[in-house]
């Protein structure tokens, strides 16, 4: 069984400051992990994914995430927030047969000018 | 080119009606999925088809019936709509292997009055 916990339901930052969105997972096997972003009234877009090749994963729009097995974490970071980053972010675990995904509860990122 | 498309984008209907949502993907994927996003933005898988065969069927009421005429299409038919069916429904597709990225459609917002 898998579960994903996003530790913050809301994160608020100022434009130009770092972003940290936290995610912990629980899995009985080595999972695949993803971050998706959902802008208001839009579908889900893949930011990045981890599939055991490298623990530090770079994604689109300057985001990156680090897989830490000892901490069962997969936190998403970005050095400098942009107004266009304001959206909801989902941490997702996969890796089962036929690709069943387990979603976290989502973190809403607000970026202030 | 649209990778995963859904129609309609919005659907407003009365309780008790029957409605369908269509999904098509042009990515050549073998596996397609339906997800439900509730009012709290939580996403949960409903169904998955691999090469027209049902492979994931979560605890979804019998009123929901997926149909896959070919591996590029997965439609969702809902009978006797209830107020609680109001949600955003997302279609997705992938190659179905563990770790494969799922590509999501833009979503269909269903409102049951």
Image (tube, coloured by chain):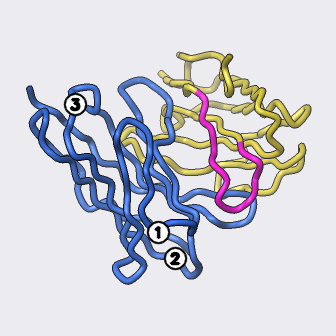
Chain colours: A blue, B yellow
Locate residue B80, reporting x and y percent. Answer: 66, 31
Query: Is circle 2 on the same chain as circle 1?
Result: yes
Decide if residue A4 is on the left or right side of residue B6.
Answer: left
- Location of residue B39 by image quarter: top left
Asked if the magenta segment contains residue B78, the reply would be: no
SS at badge 1: strand
Q: Earlier in the sequence, mark 2 or mark 3?
A: 2
Q: Would you name the residue on which mark 3 appears? A: A82
Q: Earlier in the sequence, mark 2 or mark 1?
A: 1
- Letter of the chain that mark 2 sits on in the rendering: A
- Letter of the chain that mark 1 sits on in the rendering: A
Q: Pick whichever, A102 or A49, lies toward us.
A: A49
Q: Would you name the residue on which mark 1 appears? A: A3
Decide if residue A6 is on the left or right side of residue B86.
Answer: left
Name the residue: 41% across, 56% down.
A104
Locate residue B48, reporting x and y percent. Answer: 74, 49
Q: CA distance from mark 2 to mark 3?
A: 33 Å
Q: Pick whichever, B113 or B33, lies toward us.
A: B33
Q: Is disc 2 surrounded by few (<14), some (14 to 19) or many (20+) residues within 10 Å?
A: some
Pointer 2 and pointer 1: residues touching (CB < 8 Å)?
yes
Label ID, residue A55: none
Label ID, residue A27: 2
Above or below, A45 relative to A7:
above
Q: CA distance from mark 2 to mark 1?
A: 7 Å
SS at badge 2: strand
* First to last magenta residue range: B94-105
């Amino acid at each position: 069984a898998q579960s994903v916990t996003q530790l913050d339901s809301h994160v608020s930052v100022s434009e130009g400051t770092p972003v940290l969105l936290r995610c912990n997972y629980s899995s009985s096997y080595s999972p695949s992990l993803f971050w998706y972003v959902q802008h208001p009234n839009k579908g889900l877009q893949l930011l990045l994914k981890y599939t055991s090749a490298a623990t530090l994963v770079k994604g689109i729009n300057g985001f990156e995430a680090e897989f830490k097995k000892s901490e069962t974490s997969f936190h998403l970071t970005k050095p400098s927030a942009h107004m266009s980053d304001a959206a909801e972010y989902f941490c997702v675990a996969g890796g089962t047969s036929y690709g069943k995904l387990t979603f976290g509860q989502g973190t809403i990122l607000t970026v202030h000018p | 080119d649209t990778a995963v498309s859904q129609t309609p984008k919005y659907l407003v209907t009365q309780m008790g009606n029957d409605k369908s949502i269509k999904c098509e993907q042009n990515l050549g994927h073998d596996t397609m999925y339906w997800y439900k996003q509730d009012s709290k933005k939580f996403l949960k898988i409903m169904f998955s088809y691999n090469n027209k065969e049902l492979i994931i069927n979560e605890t979804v009421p019998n009123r929901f019936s997926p149909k896959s005429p070919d591996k590029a299409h997965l439609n969702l038919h809902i009978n006797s709509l209830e107020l609680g069916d109001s949600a955003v429904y997302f279609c997705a597709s992938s190659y179905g292997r563990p770790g494969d990225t799922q590509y999501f459609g833009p979503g269909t917002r269903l409102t049951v009055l």
